[in-house]
């Protein structure tokens, strides 16, 4: 039957005192205006202890705590991190002891290699695709495949192979290469490729045997690093598919062998929240044992800010 137009009687609604209610936002958590001369630490302390402001402080504290305790800090990064000019930031963190191991995808090592050789990378894909020139740089295709093929033949993984190749030849922009810095500092760098996704796979020097064997070795090296992350931190910076999938499998094999990863903190840094990083990095690996964070923003802003906070060392208020 049809209901009538009948107003609901609100005269007996039950209420309670406002201050008695648990609230998610409190005045004590509000931001404070920046105090001139207080520097980066003062600016960070003035952030609101709400949502991303709170998460950012907790991430900084987790990394600082891991470093003080000697726990692991593993950075996974996609090609965009290199393309936005952040290799000097990562290298500085490596030199300061904020990096236990590194992982990247095939595009990440290509951009790093090109920067080391020529001080430039990231071609105009649309312009080059029409005439069939996309991905056809001579040095990239020939020398990077050479580095991989020789290194894997000698028993190295892809990351080791490229780092050693650059460290031996000292190209002009070696100081901007994460791979060269990893070789110099003896920090493991692993490279995780999908065959056919990278420009060097289009060149005649590409060896499926070397790419597959080297990437499999690097997965096992990476799994060994992940197994040491109990009480440590894993950061996924800008890899939307490959590294989140590789990380999840490394977590699984580590737990299969008895590593609980208790106290694990994971962080995803990207300009959008995407499915695989959210579930395979932030949520699933930390459920019941740790905590995951998603910090949304452009890498060219968030990573230097995070690095500066780590170098600054935080404050007692954190």
Image (cartoon, rainbow, N blue to C red):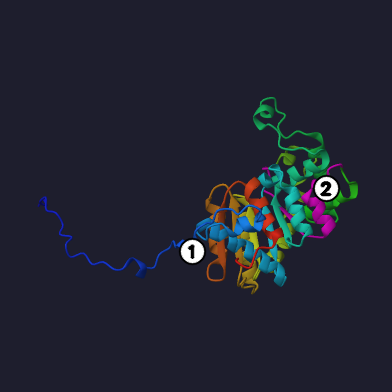
Q: Quadrant of residue 131?
A: top right
User: Residue at image x 33%, y 66%?
Assistant: 18
Q: How many labels does the image show?
A: 2
- Where residue 253 appears, as percent x and y from the top left, is 64, 66
Q: Looking at the image, which is closer to me, 43 or 68? A: 43
Which quadrant is the C terminus positioned in?
A: bottom right
Residue at left 85%, top 56%? 184
Magenta range is 172-197
Residue at numbered disc 1: 28
**Badge 2: how crowded within 10 Å, few (<14), some, or many (20+)?**
some
- Residue 215 lies, with reference to residue 114, above or below; the image says below
Magenta segment: does it hold 174?
A: yes
Q: Where is residue 57 in the image (x, y as percent from the top left)?
A: 59, 61
Q: How far apart are marks 2 and 1 (CA)?
A: 45 Å
Secondary-structure class at tag 2 = helix
SS state under label 1:
helix
The answer to whether marks 2 and 1 mark residues whose Cβ atoms lie closer than 8 Å is: no
- Crowd band around label 1 with a 10 angstrom C-alpha radius: few (<14), some (14–19), many (20+): few
Residue 105 x/y as whole percent: 69, 49
Q: Earlier in the sequence, mark 2 or mark 1?
A: 1
Q: Which mark is residue 175?
A: 2
Q: Residue furthest bottom?
A: 258
Q: Where is residue 134 in the image (x, y as percent from the top left)?
A: 70, 32
Taking 282 as reference, is 83 left or right?
Answer: right
Please say whether residue 189 is visible from this viewpoint. no
């Amino acid at each position: 039957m049809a209901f009538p137009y009948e107003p609901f009687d609100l005269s007996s609604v039950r209420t309670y005192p406002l201050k008695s209610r648990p609230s998610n936002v409190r005045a004590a958590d509000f931001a404070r205006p920046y105090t001139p001369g207080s520097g980066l630490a003062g600016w960070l302390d003035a952030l609101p202890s709400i949502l991303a402001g709170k998460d950012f402080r907790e991430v900084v504290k987790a990394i600082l705590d891991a470093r003080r305790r000697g726990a692991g800090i593993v950075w996974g990064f996609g090609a965009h991190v290199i393309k936005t000019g952040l290799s000097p930031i990562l290298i500085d963190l490596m030199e300061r002891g904020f990096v236990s191991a590194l992982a990247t995808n095939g595009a990440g090592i290509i951009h790093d290699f090109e920067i080391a050789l020529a001080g430039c990378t990231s071609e105009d894909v649309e312009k080059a695709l029409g005439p069939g020139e996309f991905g056809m740089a001579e040095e990239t295709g020939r020398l990077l495949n050479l580095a991989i093929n020789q290194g894997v033949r000698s028993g190295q993984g892809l990351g080791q192979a490229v780092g050693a190749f650059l460290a031996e030849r000292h190209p002009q922009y070696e100081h901007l290469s994460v791979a060269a810095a990893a070789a110099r500092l003896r920090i493991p760098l692993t490279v995780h490729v999908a065959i056919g996704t990278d420009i060097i796979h289009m060149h005649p020097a590409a060896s499926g045997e070397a790419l597959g064997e080297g990437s499999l070795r690097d997965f096992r090296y990476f799994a060994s690093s992940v197994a040491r992350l109990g009480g440590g931190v894993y950061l996924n910076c800008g890899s939307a598919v490959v590294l989140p999938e590789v990380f999840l499998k490394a977590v699984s094999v580590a737990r299969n062998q008895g590593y609980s990863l208790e106290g694990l903190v994971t962080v995803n840094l990207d300009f959008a929240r995407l499915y695989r990083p959210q579930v395979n990095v932030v949520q699933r690996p930390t459920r019941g044992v740790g905590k995951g964070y998603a910090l949304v923003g452009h890498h060219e802003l968030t990573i230097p800010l995070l690095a500066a906070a780590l170098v600054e060392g935080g404050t007692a208020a954190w």
